[in-house]
Amino acid sequence: MGKHHQVFRNYRQEHALTKRRVVVAAIFVLLLVGVLMGRLFYLQVMEYELYQTKANDNRVMLVTEPPPRGLIYDRHGVVLADNRPIHSLTVIPERAARLAELKEALNPLVDITEEDWAEYESRLKEYRRPYQSITLKSQLSDEEWSRVSVDLYKLDGVQVEAQLTRYYPFGEAFAHAIGYVGRITAKDLERVDRMAYQGALFIGKTGVEEYYESTLFGKPGISKVEVNARGRIMSEIERQNPTPGKDLHLHMDARLQQYAYDLLGSYKGSVVAIDPDTGGVLAMVSKPGFDPNLFVRGISVNQYAELRDDKRLPLFNRALRGGYPPASTIKPFMGLAGLEYGFSSWTERYYARGYYQINPDGRRYRDWKRGGHGWIDLERSIIESVDTYYYQLAHKMGITPIHTFLSKFGYGQTSILDLNGASAGLLPSNEWKKARYKEPWYPGDSVNVGIGQGFMVATPIQIATANAALAARGHMYYPRMVETIDDATATFDDNDGVEHTITLKDQRNWERMVDAMEKVVTDSRGTARRLQGTEYDIAGKTGTGQVFSLADDQEYDADSLDKRLHDHALFIGFAPADQPKIAIFAIFENGGSSSKPADLSKALFDAYLYDEYPAEYDYFEDQGR
């Protein structure tokens, strides 16, 4: 048997070792507790204010409330852009069922299109405040509202909200002038204060609505709310109500605007009426128009495609962007230019044949009257609208004096002060042609410009501005839409060139030219003699703008041409001629005879000066004044 060794334990030594370990552990724990307590003291005492602020930031949230949009009125107090309450179906995604279940529950109750659902899904991906509702369908019908209200208790996260929305009571006749609001896009937010527009649904897209967006929008309200850990609003702590946007009062006369639109009939075209004493736009019509209410809550793809693809271009603002040859409406200005630079006089006589040639064997620039007019002077050239007189005058002057003089009246410029998107048209020059075509300016180019054809292109607002300056005998106001903002007169930066005076070497030429334009109406051979018989004097000038060029031996035959190739019909005029209160430019696209815009202008003169409109326009008077 082997030997067994017995091991004896040293209990005293083990006890001492255990005691040392307990003491070390206790000291370590006490140190940790000390560090922890010190940290707590630092955080809760030394850094109290900092962390209290951070805690409040997590608990308290600022929420903006969009203000009611300012209204837009005409000069007589007729509301042109209103705010109306509607009921919209909204969804709080955090509380609602999944999309498929939501569709199944709502589609039988409300007519929600696939476009509405697609828009909802798109807005789900955008940044928004937690538990902020998203509009699924706006402007519920009474029947839809009733059906949803009955089942609302079963539809978690679904609610019907009362909202203010923009409404345009007079529709398409005012669409291009007033403009419209539409849903805010990411691009829109780049030009505004994002915080101010948080929660806002609309922003001005075109017209007065766009230009005066900051004025109409107002100041948003701010609410300080308490939220839970998930960001849901639990209670309101403090509230500052929104400040409504300011109201705009326009120079526009709503009855005149609607009347002008209606008088254009089935024609495409434009009418611009200006007060020569202020530059205020009394009417600015572009026809055809469109219903701006379609854009307020988001136009459907099909509706927009229909407007976009319409060959009559209802979305195109002809008044601001339509480029037309000013035709014979340019002749009074050409006549004044000739006088100013010494190329013509009131007494000089000219034999007007049925054509003009720069060279004896060269091209024949034909007059509208193929047999010619015989011996005439400057005044007679205006009365009978003699083309050959202005061919030879433009040939003598050349393009530089023409360009210099016409630019004083706003040609070649974006003249309107408070609308965006106006075209500058084209007032050609020698430098322009070299840059554009790499060619010099030829005498034939000047000849064409002499009767407002060739390279020259002007917009209705430009021609109307020049006409108003002529009516005011050289005192030129750039046109403006807004007269007052709330009760304060609208002002413009002096750098914008709000007005200026065109001074002639002989100021008597203003009156002599106006006298000649009066005889366009009163003379037996005047081109607007059909306007005779008014109790006031009208000064006017007709024009016929060629859509295509005729060959040297070709005659214009409207009956054999497609409608779109007919000449444009133009007219400028103002009344009363001695102290004008209204200056009008009108164009009928492919209208042929200038009698159409002349008759339209006379009807507008009668209505505006005597405040007498057809009975069907009484509803404007009932709303205003």
Image: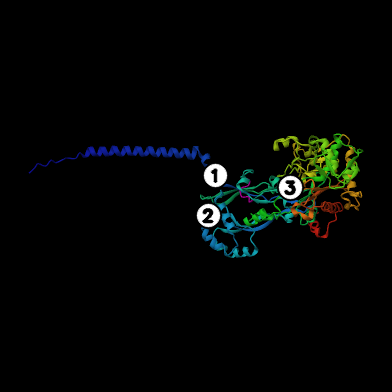
- Identify the residue under disc 1: 57
The residue that disc 2 covers is 94
Q: Nearer the viewer, residue 582 or 310?
A: 310
Question: Crowdedness of circle 3 by 10 Å Cα count: few (<14), some, many (20+)?
Answer: some
Q: Position of residue 526 (x, y in %)?
A: 89, 48
Calculate the distance from the C-alpha at mark 1 to the C-alpha at mark 3. Answer: 55 Å
Describe the element under mark 1 as helix, strand or loop.
Answer: helix
Predominant secondary structure in magenta? loop
Visible residue check, residue 401:
yes
Neighbour tally class for label 2: few under 14, some 14-19, many 20 plus, Cα within 10 Å: some
Q: Residues within 10 Å of mark 1 (few under 14, many from 20)?
A: few
Q: Which residue is mark 3?
A: 322
Residue at (91, 48) in percent of width and height: 523
Which is in the foreground here, disc 2 or disc 1? 2
Task: Give the secondary structure at mark 2.
Answer: loop
In the drawing, does residue 23 fall left or right of residue 123?
left
Q: Please tell me whether residue 199 belongs to the stretch shown in magenta.
A: yes
Amino acid marked by disc 2? Glu
